[in-house]
Image (tube, rainbow, N blue to C red):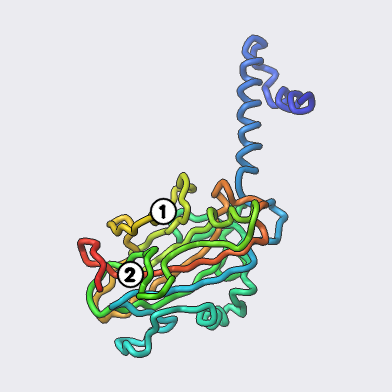
Amino acid sequence: MGFFSKKVDEMVNENVPRRKRKALIAFVSILTLLSMVTSTYAWFKINTFAGVDSLDMHISVSAQLKVSMEDHGTDLEAYEKIITNEMIDGYLGQYNTSLEDIILDPVTTTDGRVFTNQRGAERQPNDRSYLQFKCFFIATEDMWVHLTTESTDDGMDDGTRVSTTSTGAQADVINCPRVGFVCENGDSAIYEPNAGTPVNGQNTFDLPSGTMVYSNGTRLFHLNAMEPTEVTISLWIDGEDPQCDDDVQDAHLAVQLGFIGCDEDNIPIS
């Protein structure tokens, strides 16, 4: 602490009256210690190059709702009920990468549209830092689309969940991700599994651990009947999250997203 105190003392202007210097030094010391703590509270080390490097994705949709990686117009038969890793890899081909190659190094965002690293530099999608792809959703009737923890079809176990096969401190990786949805009609939302205190001004929502309850707060975007709608989905681990530290490096992350359509009163459409 001698070296630290000396440095703090040097920070205080020599022209400050002696009787005020002790109080000012104490104040500067507290601020300096706080900055030291907050700078290591989250994020990986600046020179770290090993993020979350094992990623699985699975997307499924419920009745009256279909999805595809391409816009097929109103040809319902061309759309799918699921999107697999292989389909996402097909999309990522334009970036000369794949899910296997993507390493989720920490980034942060306020709105799910612009992402920056710890230094504040903007990062581009599918270049180490975060995964991003586009889907086209189509519905047979007007609906609000929500995430659901329930199975989208009988006998399926495809409700929304974020999980890991990693153990120990690495298992905290499930507390770091965010999934953002930006719809071409302007609707947007950020899902924060195992949500804690919001960071970086983000407006996020979590899903209940028990019975699924739908509300205006869990709405993702609106669909008009038989109008294919482009939705950009982003997956990142947020460097501002308190548990996004070196302990979760090299962890495995599995993200399963189940979508369901609801009417204006947030009642599921069957």
Q: On the rendered structure, is 243 left or right of 233?
A: right
Q: At numbered mark 1, what does the secondary structure look like: helix, strand or loop?
A: strand
Q: Earlier in the sequence, mark 1 or mark 2?
A: 1
Return the residue nearer the eye: 210 or 6.
Answer: 210
Q: Residue at x 43, y 65 (%)?
A: 160
Identity, as a three-letter code, of the amino acid under mark 2 = Ile
Return the residue nearer the eye: 21 or 200.
Answer: 200
Name the residue tied to disc 1: 204
Name the residue tied to disc 2: 260
> Is residue 19 at least partly visible in the picture?
yes
Q: Residue at x 38, y 55 (%)?
A: 210
Q: At numbered mark 2, what does the secondary structure look like: helix, strand or loop?
A: strand
Query: Alpha-carbon neighbours of circle 2 within 10 Å: few (<14), some, or many (≥20)?
Result: many
**What is the quadrant of the N terminus in the image?**
top right
Q: Position of residue 163 (x, y in %)?
A: 53, 62
Q: On the rendered structure, is 251 left or right of 216?
A: right
Between circles 1 and 2, the one closer to the viewer is 2
Q: Which mark is residue 19?
A: none
